[in-house]
Amino acid sequence: MLLPSLCALNMDGLLSPDLRIIGTARSELDDDGYRAFAREALEKHLPEERKPGIDALLPRLSYQALDANDTSHFTLLAEKVGPVGAGLAIFLSTAPSLFEPTIAGLTAARLVDGKVRIGLEKPLGSDLATSREINDAVAKAFSEDRIFRIDHYLGKETVQNLLALRFANLMFEPLWNAAHIDNIQITIAETVGLENRAGYYEGSGALRDMVQNHLLQLVALTAMEPPLSYEATAIRDEKVKVLRALRRIECDDVVTGQYRKGAIAGEGVPGYDEELGKDSDVETFVAIRAHVDNWRWQGVPFYLRTGKRLAERRTEIVVTFRQVPHSIFPKANARLQQNQLIIGIQPEENIQLSLMAKVPGLDRNGVRLRAVALDIETPEAFSGPTRRIAYERLLLDLLEGDQTLFVRRDEVEAQWGWIDAIRSCWADNHMKPKTYAAGTWGPSSAVALAERAGVTWHD
């Protein structure tokens, strides 16, 4: 995602003419070797209309081999960078164990001075304690206003559009509370398996890989109070209030699963243990019934669900409104369905509102009603602007210093505190994942989690 995003920004003239991009890793490459690697990656991952921009990006690229545990390597990097000015931004994507030595090396090489910004890619720890260690290490060199913690879901257009939907339309915000909403479902479903991430995923699992960051950020944006303005501090202040108001989860409120062999799009796929090459108790699916204990959301369940090797790739937020208090229509002909607002995030970006409408006819046997959908498909509604991947927006914001779509330390720690309580519950009760066939929507107990309250997952 990173090089294609930079290539797209460069093609559109959004990068400063004197911007240089220096890649680092342990691999021994020279500048030409890195450019060849970059060209191959860009040819593979860029859409056709963006490929003409490859030749213009490559001269900006250079490379410095670096072992984060060898301080002398950072001296070589500093020589490559040259004088540090206000425009230096560091993008750090590394294992949690390497954050502290990396920050120490950057500090020793004086690459953290002045107004240097740092972008931090997940995972930012494996629990609250390790997250604090990483945040403490980074805070020794960078003030909070120079730290950009990345959750790439916040760069997605439809996620940002959620704020516009709520706070720019009078028809929604007055209804956005427990008096009018019955339940909210948030699903992040994947059809892929391990995808060469076995080492990372075996140490993470679905709860820490997806719930701790992406799902909880979507909960915060969905449930937050109106901020004072569309400004980084105001928005993040309201998000952290939601995260701190999350009720501690009981074991009965969580279902975990692990996929077994099955079929995706008609093709047979192996189970998790088979892909991994050994037996494992790591969860590849999580479903949670959560509550936000504040005035606005008291009594409204938030059903959260994520998993690998599910029936289809889909990320969406489904808001189900309460039933009308009294129906004036004969029940035999007009069974009322609850209105639903469906916000599709990926792979399709759309907003759909289901309404009850009269079926055309003379109604000699009574009025007939049927649910109909009002659809707004973002690509069709906005055919002019270029559709961008999330990292284009986030990298540009990092370069320009806008923190609105990045996660603050107190948000991260509130998220980890909630996740740690769930993991403690699993450990105390010796809970193991239930199995489900690849190509389904997870364990049957996840269905029961919702149906016990009369709720049906939006499949």
Image: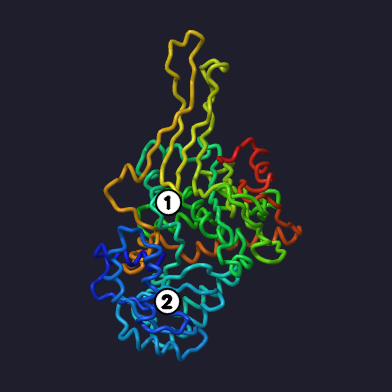
Q: Where is residue 444 in the image (x, y as percent from the top left)?
A: 68, 44
Q: Earlier in the sequence, mark 1 or mark 2?
A: 2
- Quarter of the figure with residue 202: bottom right
Q: In this view, does 246 lie to the left or right of 280?
A: left
Residue type highlighted by circle 2: Phe
* Callout 1: SS: helix
281 to 104, vertically: above or below: above
How far is mark 1 from mark 2, CA to CA? Answer: 28 Å
1 to 320, vertically: above or below: below
Q: Which residue lies furthest to the front in this view?
A: 267
Residue behind mark 1: 159
Total marks placed: 2
Q: Residues within 10 Å of mark 2 (few under 14, many from 20)?
A: many
Residue behind mark 2: 142
Q: Which of 438 and 386 is in front in this view?
A: 438
Q: Position of residue 349 (x, y in %)?
A: 41, 47
Quadrant of the rendering where the N terminus is positioned: bottom left
Q: Position of residue 315 (x, y in %)?
A: 50, 49
Circle on res. 453: none
Q: Nearer the viewer, residue 127 or 76?
A: 76
Q: In this view, does 297 lie to the left or right of 110?
A: right
